[in-house]
Image (tube, rainbow, N blue to C red):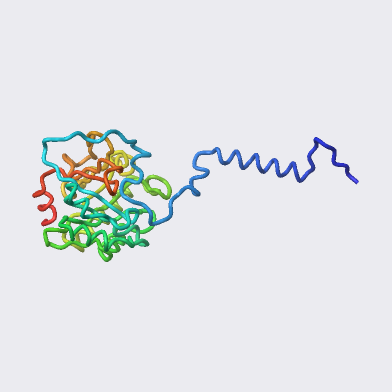
């Protein structure tokens, strides 16, 4: 009969200790705990990856150039105090409608109609997931569930939110050429369905990394650039100027605040097409 002596470890104990050592080593490897840390599908929102990848700086100073304040919201904001935003000077808004081909914002009606109700010009945005379905399929899903456009002077063209993948690899497992193809499919389908060129929301650093700094969309698609610093910074290739700038995620009432590069009549002009 084996005798277990104090200070020694049986075979079972040795195996357990070895297993714990291996697990500890694995947890120190890059990305080992990433799966558990990933958010739930459908929870993504504009600018979700900006602070982690580009950092944050100060707020932009007051400018003499004409600019018009706007906000963007998703289900994270729930019921939005639109009247308070209007009183504070906000005149336009974008509301997340969809993600991939699997998610619809349950707060969309309150947010989309609520902003319209207080007098704002509003639009809808789609959070792209190029690793789940094709660009055309996602454009159809978006248009079918809130992303359409009407020539009423109060509806902005839909926006494609294309940025870091919160659920996996930054570029959704696509090469730059494949990513450009996916984006083009989305934009072409959106225009076919609505008659409008969609706005592209992105960050310059992501655009460089994941599209190879493709310059082919600037002639037709308005640019909405994300950068949480005092200036808008470098723009992606193909755009000589930005149309909108998301400059903070910590602004009053809803967090995400934006500046339209122009006076209110230019917001109206974009809505009219």
Residue 49, image quadrant: top left
Q: Residue at x 13, y 50 (%)?
A: 267
Residue 111, image quadrant: bottom left
Q: Residue at x 43, y 51 (%)?
A: 39
Residue 232, image quadrant: top left
Quarter of the image with the C terminus is bottom left
Q: Residue at x 48, y 45 (%)?
A: 34
Determine whether, in the image, residue 23 is placed left or right of residue 271. Answer: right
Q: Residue at x 16, y 40 (%)?
A: 241
- Residue 146 is situated, as x and y percent measured from the top left of the image, at 25, 63
Is residue 7 visible in the rendered image? The answer is yes
**Toward the viewer: 146 or 80?**
80
**Toward the viewer: 172 or 99?**
99
**Toward the viewer: 217 or 3?**
3
Query: Does residue 61 lie above or below 219 as drawn?
Result: above
Query: Does residue 31 lie above or below 119 as drawn?
Result: above
Task: Residue at the far left: name it.
Answer: 265
Query: Does residue 7 lie above or below 217 as drawn?
Result: above
Task: Residue at the far bottom: name it.
Answer: 144
Task: Residue at the far right: name it.
Answer: 1
Is residue 185 visible in the rendered image? The answer is no
Determine whether, in the image, residue 168 is placed left or right of residue 187. Answer: right
């Amino acid at each position: 009969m084996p005798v277990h002596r104090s200070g020694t470890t049986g075979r079972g104990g040795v195996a357990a200790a070895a297993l714990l050592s291996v697990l500890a080593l694995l947890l120190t490897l890059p990305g080992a705990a990433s799966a558990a840390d990933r958010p739930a599908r459908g929870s993504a929102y504009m600018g979700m990856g900006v602070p982690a990848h580009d950092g944050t700086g100060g707020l932009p100073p007051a400018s003499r150039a004409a600019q018009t304040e706007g906000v963007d919201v998703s289900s994270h904001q729930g019921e939005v105090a639109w009247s308070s935003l209007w009183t504070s000077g906000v005149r336009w808004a974008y509301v997340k409608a969809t993600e991939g081909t699997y998610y619809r914002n349950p707060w969309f009606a309150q947010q989309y109609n609520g902003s319209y109700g207080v007098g704002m010009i509003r639009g809808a945005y789609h959070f792209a997931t190029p690793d789940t379905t094709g660009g055309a399929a996602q454009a159809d899903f978006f248009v079918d569930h809130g992303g359409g456009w009407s020539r009423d002077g109060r509806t902005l063209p839909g926006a494609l939110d294309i940025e870091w993948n919160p659920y996996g690899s930054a570029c959704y497992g696509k090469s730059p050429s494949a990513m450009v193809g996916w984006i083009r499919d989305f934009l072409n389908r959106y225009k076919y369905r609505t008659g409008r060129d969609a706005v592209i929301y992105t960050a310059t650093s992501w655009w460089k990394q994941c599209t190879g700094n493709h310059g082919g969309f600037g002639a037709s698609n308005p640019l909405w650039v994300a950068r949480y610093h005092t200036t808008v910074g470098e723009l992606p290739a193909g755009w000589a100027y930005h149309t909108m700038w998301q400059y903070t995620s910590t602004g009053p009432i809803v967090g995400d605040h934006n500046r339209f590069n122009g006076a209110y009549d230019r917001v109206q002009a974009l809505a009219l097409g």
